[in-house]
Amino acid sequence: MDLIEVAPNAKPPVAKLRSWSKFKYEQEKKRKESKTKSSQLKEMWFKPFIGDADLKHKLKKVKEFIKDKDSVKLTIRKVGRVQNQHLRDLMKKILKKIEEYAEPQGHPKFHGRTLGIIVIPRKTKLIKNEEQNEEQNKNTSSDKKKIQSEQKGEDETQETGK
């Protein structure tokens, strides 16, 4: 058993009688836990001529990473005789689609034959607002369908009444 000073800045200083090895073990355990809770850097690769469905799927995965509060490195690899401007345009398109829930750190930069940028999560309010907008869109689309079906019913009754 050792006398361990726990809070030296407190008035009066706080000390406990504990086993030194157990105290060091608990400190190391807390330090490791704090490391694992920090956000990680994920990476998503894109090809220069990616299809719309593939792009949508990859952006869905990026959104999942962002919701987990991980930073994401977006990378487009230059293949063949692809112009740099095409890569920049594709990166702009990607950033525009994810701007609601992620924000870029800096500008896209070329590293050899790849164009890359790191995006970080925005505040959670924006993600919640996006989900609310999706729900509202679903509600308005179902309301529109109801209105259209009612109008068709009225049109049919008017035609038969003529």
Image (cartoon, rainbow, N blue to C red):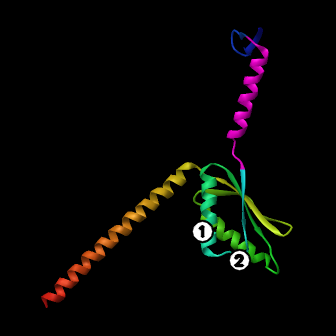
- Where is 134 relative to 148, above or below? above
Query: In this orientation, which residue lies closer to the viewer: 35 or 11?
Result: 35
Q: Position of residue 72 (x, y in %)?
A: 70, 56
Q: Which residue is mark 2?
A: 49
Residue 13 in view (yes/no): no
Q: Tag 1: Cα neighbours inside 10 Å, few (<14), some, or many (≥20)?
A: some
Please name the residue shown 42% across and 65% down the image: 137
Kindly identify the residue that appears in the image at 38 percent across and 69 percent down. Answer: 141
Residue segment shown in magenta: 18-40
Residue placed under numbered mark 1 in the picture: 56
Amino acid type at circle 2 is Phe
Using residue 92 as the reference point, say whether residue 115 is left or right of it. Answer: right
Q: Secondary structure at mark 2?
A: loop
Give the main secondary structure of the magenta stretch: helix
Q: Which residue is drawn at the image coordinates 57% and 59% (left, top)? A: 100
Residue 40 spot, x, y in % from top left: 71, 48
- For residue 18, what is the image quadrant? top right
- Residue 37 quadrant: top right
- The residue lying furthest to the right in this view is 112
Q: Quadrant of the rendered structure where residue 83 is?
A: bottom right
